[in-house]
């Protein structure tokens, strides 16, 4: 299951805050802030999808993520590689290094990361 762009935006706020009440979430949005009803709808959808849960405290709800950010984006990237790069990490790496404006220094840093991963295996 995947999040929409607006759900991802809210999820990023929740990942940063770890747990939050509606007021905390609204305060974290940049201007123009969405309506409370919009955020409530997003939270309901994300709860239904199994990404968010809440604890009832009196008449308030304290929301928290059920999915770790790293796990979500790992699955997302693996889906991109599978669906858009014929399940080939090499094709993805080639596209990424050629089609992004990485500096020589950034490419060398990537090489170091890859070399370190090779040494670990």
Image (cartoon, rainbow, N blue to C red):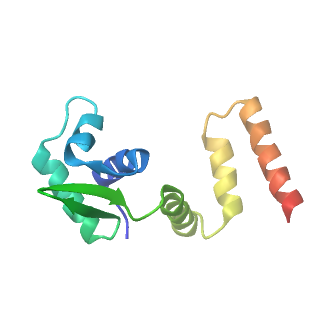
Residue located 68% across and 44% down the image:
97
Q: Does 22 sit above or below residue 79? A: above
Q: Position of residue 110 (x, y in %)?
A: 75, 43
Rendering quarter of residue 70: bottom right
Residue located 56% across and 65% down the image:
78
Q: As rendered, which of 13 and 53 lies closer to the eye? A: 53
Callout count: 0
Residue located 64% across and 57% down the image:
92
Q: Position of residue 111 (x, y in %)?
A: 80, 45
Identify the image quadrant of the N terminus. Answer: bottom left
* Left or right of 101 in this view: 70: left
* Left or right of 82 in this view: 43: left
Identify the image quadrant of the C terminus. Answer: bottom right
Q: As rendered, which of 77 and 53 lies closer to the eye? A: 53
Q: Position of residue 62 (x, y in %)?
A: 26, 55
Q: Does 46 sit above or below residue 109? A: below
């Amino acid at each position: 299951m995947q999040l929409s762009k607006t759900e991802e935006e809210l999820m990023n706020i929740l990942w940063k805050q770890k747990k939050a009440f509606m007021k905390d979430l609204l305060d974290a949005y940049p201007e123009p802030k969405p309506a409370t009803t919009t955020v409530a709808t997003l939270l309901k959808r994300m709860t239904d999808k199994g990404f968010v849960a809440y604890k009832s405290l009196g008449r308030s709800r304290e929301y928290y993520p059920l999915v770790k950010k790293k796990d979500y984006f790992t699955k997302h990237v693996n889906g991109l590689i599978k669906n858009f790069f014929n399940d080939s990490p090499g094709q993805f790496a080639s596209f990424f290094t050629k089609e992004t404006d990485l500096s020589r220094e950034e490419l060398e840093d990537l090489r170091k990361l890859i070399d370190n991963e090779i040494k670990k295996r």
